[in-house]
Image (spheres, grey):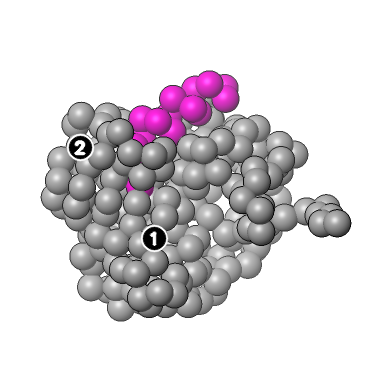
């Protein structure tokens, strides 16, 4: 008998729209042993601080090591879907502290191009930073959450994390000043590469959660 009264983890907030709806993670939160969907409708978002990194290596995905720096709820969790988790923000102050605190348009799948882009993520403390990546492949008909293949090209991020690591899920991807996607999975045998979901899929699900 498996009994759980709570669950917590480190992930990345992808976006907040002007109505206060947010999207995060880019993939479903599932029970680690069974893969079954977790009911987290009573969950909340809280601040997290990244204390260290387990660097990713071939055959061994890395991860962010973090701690919850406050129990104050930044927002609720209304839906856990295959596009991520969604809900409403109730504290706007932390949004103003972000690297990008002005509205960005959404880049739809047909507007995404192979080539240079950047991801926003945290690798130390609570400071959001931009890192260079490359859009390697665009697959509109792929399984949800794997529409994009990205490759980390930023030498500093490669040196720090080895590429994509657990906890980066949800890290927004920006191309031509548009939000085009969010990181979802790492390639286990090539941690410099990972999958990402189209941002417009997340935004659509966010609208439905409103």
- Taking the magenta stretch, the answer to whether it contains residue 179 is no
User: Where residue 131 appears, x then y in whole percent?
Assistant: 28, 61
Give 130 or 58, whichever is nearer the viewer. 58
- What segment carries the magenta color? 196-210
Vertical comparison of 142 with 162: above or below: above
Q: Is residue 70 left or right of residue 136?
A: right
Residue that numbered label 1 is attached to: 186
> Distance from label 1 to label 2 (Cα)?
20 Å
Rate crowding at label 1 as few (under 14), some (14 to 19) or many (20 or more) other CA atoms within 10 Å. many
Q: Give the foreground label among 1 and 2.
A: 1
Quadrant housing the C terminus: top right
First-in-chain label (1 vs 2): 2
Evaluate whether residue 135 shows in this view.
Answer: yes
Residue occupying the point 36% across, 36% down: 199
- Label 1 secondary element: strand
SS of the residue at dot 2? loop
Q: Position of residue 75 (x, y in %)?
A: 63, 40
**Residue visible at 64% across and 43% down in the picture:** 37
Q: Position of residue 28 (x, y in %)?
A: 55, 43
Image coordinates for residue 32, horizontal then vertical, percent: 63, 58
* Residue 200 shown in magenta: yes
Q: Quadrant of residue 132?
A: bottom left
Give the image quarter of residue 15. top left
Q: Is residue 185 left or right of residue 137?
A: right
Q: Main secondary structure of the magenta part?
A: helix
| Residue behind mark 2 | 112
Q: Check residue 29 in the rendering and tell me which mark sits there, or answer none.
A: none
């Amino acid at each position: 008998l498996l009994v759980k009264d709570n669950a917590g983890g480190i992930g990345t907030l992808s976006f907040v729209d002007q109505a206060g709806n947010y999207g995060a993670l880019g993939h479903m939160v599932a029970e680690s042993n069974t893969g079954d969907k977790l009911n987290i409708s009573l969950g909340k978002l809280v601040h997290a601080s990244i204390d260290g990194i387990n660097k990713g290596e071939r055959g061994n995905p890395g991860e962010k090591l973090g701690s919850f720096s406050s129990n104050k709820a930044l927002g609720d969790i209304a839906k856990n879907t295959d596009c991520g988790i969604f809900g409403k923000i109730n504290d706007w102050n932390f949004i103003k502290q972000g690297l990008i605190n002005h509205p960005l348009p959404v880049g739809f799948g047909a507007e995404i191009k192979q080539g240079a882009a950047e991801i926003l993520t945290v690798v130390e403390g609570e400071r959001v930073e931009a890192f260079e990546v490359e859009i390697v492949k665009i697959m509109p008909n792929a399984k949800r959450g794997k529409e994009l293949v990205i490759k980390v090209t930023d030498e500093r991020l490669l040196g720090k994390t080895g590429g994509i690591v657990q906890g980066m899920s949800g890290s927004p991807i920006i191309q031509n000043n548009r939000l085009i996607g969010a990181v979802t999975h790492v390639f286990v045998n090539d941690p410099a590469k990972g999958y990402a979901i189209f941002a417009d899929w997340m935004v659509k699900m966010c609208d439905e959660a409103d």
